[in-house]
Amino acid sequence: MINRELIRIKIVQLTYAYYQNGSKNLTKAENELIYSLSMAYSLYNYMLMLIVAISREMGHRVEVATTRAEREGTKLPNTKFVDNKFARQLEENLMLLDFADEQKLSWADDIEFVRKLCSIIEQSQIYQDYMADEDDSYEADREVWRKLYKAIIQDNPDLDALLEEKSLYWNDDKEVVDTFVLKTIKRFEMVNGKKQELLPEYDDEEDKAFACKLFRATILNCNQYQRYMSDASRNWDFSRLAYMDVVIMQIAIAEMMTFPNIPISVTINEYVDLAKLYSTSKSGGYINGMLDTIARFLIDCGELHKAIDPPKPRKF
């Protein structure tokens, strides 16, 4: 699940925080990086557990409604949603159960929030259409949860606030983690039963080493990389650059210099996108030009042994 896109985001955040922290303890900061990545994986599991928590609460509502209907002799409630085959499979998933037990994760303390989500779901057109549809296939059961997650859970300010109270990391991670949860829902197959594999913590075992190596290179070679920036910005007052721009370019140069197998164009594009997310409106275009200039200079002077791709038109 933790891929290089997420790693780059974390390193931008942690590098910025490192320079704001007076102690500047590299080992401590590196441990913080690994911990923050592990918290993203915890959030991924926690959001899958939210689906289970909602399903269980809906089941409790149906039980209460069934008891009332039997007592009053009225029509029994529709059990289609609580019998949802995807949600049942997720509830029994061995990887999710093991992770929840190991990390002591639970939605029990936030049952009122879960109940609120249940009420929102019941009032949604997605839910009403699903309950009225005679299609009882596994695919339909899985698809309704994909739709509900996108419509009600993915962009939910109340949920964001709740997660931020639980962990300072989780609010920043939520947007990326949502994409992984939706990917997981789509990947589920009924034939796999409770042994359906969730996404692993790291997409590639080398990615954890990538994270540490990139972060260390960024910090340990900061003076050298900032000299490259200063030389490339002769028509600019380097001291007046947005501080986040400096951080982002420093990490990008570290990646270009440290990882020979990553094309220069890939590195530049990744950090231009991060500049749009974390810095000023003009930062993307400026950083694109700066990094291209620095890369060409480093190649010309023999410091960087990579080919540079022809520039592709980009909108800034």
Image (spheres, grey):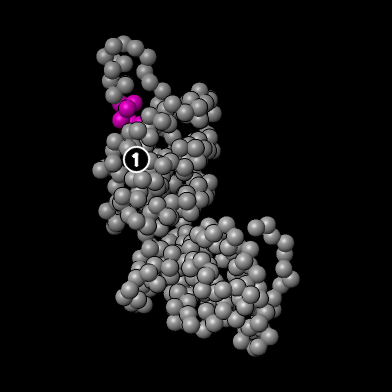
Q: Dominant secondary structure of the magenta stretch?
A: helix
Residue reaching furthest bottom? 302
The residue range painted magenta reads 58-63
Q: Position of residue 38 (x, y in %)?
A: 38, 62
* Residue 237 appearing in the image: yes
Q: Is residue 83 above or below residue 227?
A: above
Specify whether residue 62 is painted magenta. yes
Q: Is residue 165 left or right of residue 141?
A: left
Identify the amino acid type marked 1.
Ala
Quadrant of the rendered structure where residue 110 is? top left
Side (left or right) of 239 relative to 309:
left
Residue closest to the eye, 237 or 25: 237
- For the point 72% across and 68% down, which residue is it? 311
The x and y percentages for residue 13 are 43, 64
Question: Does the segment drawn in magenta span residue 47?
Answer: no
Residue occupied by mark 1: 53
Q: Residues within 10 Å of mark 1 (few under 14, many from 20)?
A: many
Residue 262 visible, this angle: no
Q: Secondary structure at mark 1?
A: helix
Residue 95, image quadrant: bottom left
- Which residue is drawn at the image coordinates 40% and 58% (left, top)? 40
Front residue of 125/143: it is: 125
Q: x, y (%) of residue 42?
A: 37, 56
Q: Nearer the viewer, residue 296 or 2?
A: 296
Question: From what the image shows, is residue 237 above or below residue 269?
Answer: below
Query: In the picture shown, does residue 38 fall above or below 234?
Result: above
What percent of the width, then of the height, locates residue 230? 56, 79
Which residue is at 44% across, 34% downward?
A: 84
The residue located at (53%, 69%) in the rendering is 241
Q: In this orientation, which residue lies closer to the viewer: 35 or 19?
A: 19
